[in-house]
Image: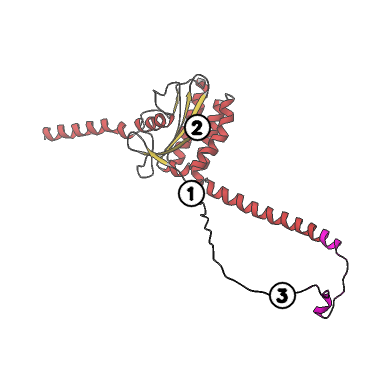
């Protein structure tokens, strides 16, 4: 009995030690580049926690002044994987991480996605988020920029869950439709103007009953005619297709996980 109890306690201890390996070992905010004040850090961390819990996926922000010689993509992916980020959605470790690298002369930014974050943050969506954050970051409004990132993350994930992820294919179709409508309207207006201008130049004429009335005597003389078939030439021009499609491009991190992402 004592031996069985000892084995049970040992198993419980091993299980307890294994739990951190499957849970995030780092906070959702790591401001190692000191871009925020202590008060601002508390505000951002609270919002990250609330949004992550509501979305059932981790929304992470990391700032650093040292990427350990790695590319922004590799540093962001490894930081996400090594610190155990990602929750819910059948264990696919879904989430998104915003990396801000202070290189001494300015900042470089990268967004890394994993699990459902890849679907929610399409390549187009990442660039859209970047376009909204870049002006704030460039002006040094870090708290506002990070709050905007959290807000946009919430919007993109909810939009994707509703079956309508932010993507360039839909944006392009809307632009094409708008372009067609504008072209038709402009074409009709120009056609109406040209038709009226041409119409005014013509003088009234009277209809003649016989075709011979329209001929000038002696003006048509046919001395001979022949049709000789020589050859046929066919010219083929290949149609260039645009293979650029929407969605998210992915790559494999050093840990073997599939990630999406992009810089801005």
Reading the chain from its start, which is encountered first: label 1 or label 2?
Answer: 2
> In the image, is residue 189 part of the stretch drawn in magenta?
no
Q: What secondary structure is marked by label 1?
A: loop
- Report the span colored magenta: 196-222
Q: Left of 173 or right of it: where is 19?
A: left
Q: Nearer the viewer, residue 88 or 188?
A: 188
Q: Which residue is mark 3?
A: 223
Q: Can residue 58 be seen by looking at this rendering?
A: no
Q: Which residue is mark 2?
A: 47
Q: What secondary structure is marked by label 2?
A: helix
The residues bearing labels 2 and 3 have C-alpha atoms spaced at a distance of 94 Å
Main secondary structure type of the part rendered in magenta: loop
Label ID, residue 243? 1
Reading the chain from its start, which is encountered first: label 2 or label 3?
Answer: 2
Which quadrant would residue 206 be assigned to in this image? bottom right
Residue 263, position as x, y percentages in the image: 49, 33
Reading the chain from its start, which is encountered first: label 3 or label 1?
Answer: 3
Residue 77, position as x, y percentages in the image: 39, 33
The residues bearing labels 1 and 2 have C-alpha atoms spaced at a distance of 39 Å
Mark 3–mark 1 CB contact (< 8 Å)? no
């Amino acid at each position: 009995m004592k031996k069985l109890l000892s084995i049970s306690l040992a198993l419980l201890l091993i299980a307890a030690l294994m739990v951190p390996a499957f849970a995030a070992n780092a906070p959702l905010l790591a401001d190692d580049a000191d871009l925020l004040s202590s008060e601002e850090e508390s505000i951002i961390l609270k919002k990250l926690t609330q949004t992550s819990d509501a979305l059932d996926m981790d929304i992470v922000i990391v700032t650093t002044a040292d990427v350990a010689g790695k590319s922004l993509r590799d540093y962001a992916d490894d930081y996400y994987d090594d610190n155990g980020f990602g929750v819910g959605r059948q264990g696919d470790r879904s989430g998104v991480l915003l990396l801000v690298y202070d290189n001494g002369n300015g900042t470089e930014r990268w967004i890394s996605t994993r699990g459902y974050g890849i679907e929610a943050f399409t390549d187009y969506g990442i660039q859209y988020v970047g376009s909204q954050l870049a002006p704030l970051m460039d002006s040094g409004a870090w708290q506002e920029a990070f709050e905007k990132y959290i807000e946009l993350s919430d919007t993109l994930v909810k939009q994707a869950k509703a079956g309508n992820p932010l993507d360039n294919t839909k944006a392009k179709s809307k632009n094409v439709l708008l372009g067609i409508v504008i072209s038709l309207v402009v074409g009709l207006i120009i056609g109406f103007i040209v038709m009226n201008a041409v119409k005014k130049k013509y003088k009234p004429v009277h209809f003649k009953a016989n075709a011979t009335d329209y001929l000038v005597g002696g003006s048509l003389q046919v001395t001979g005619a022949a049709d000789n078939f020589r050859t046929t030439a066919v010219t083929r021009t290949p149609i260039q297709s645009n293979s650029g499609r929407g969605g998210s491009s992915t790559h494999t991190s050093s840990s073997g996980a599939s990630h999406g992402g992009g810089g801005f």
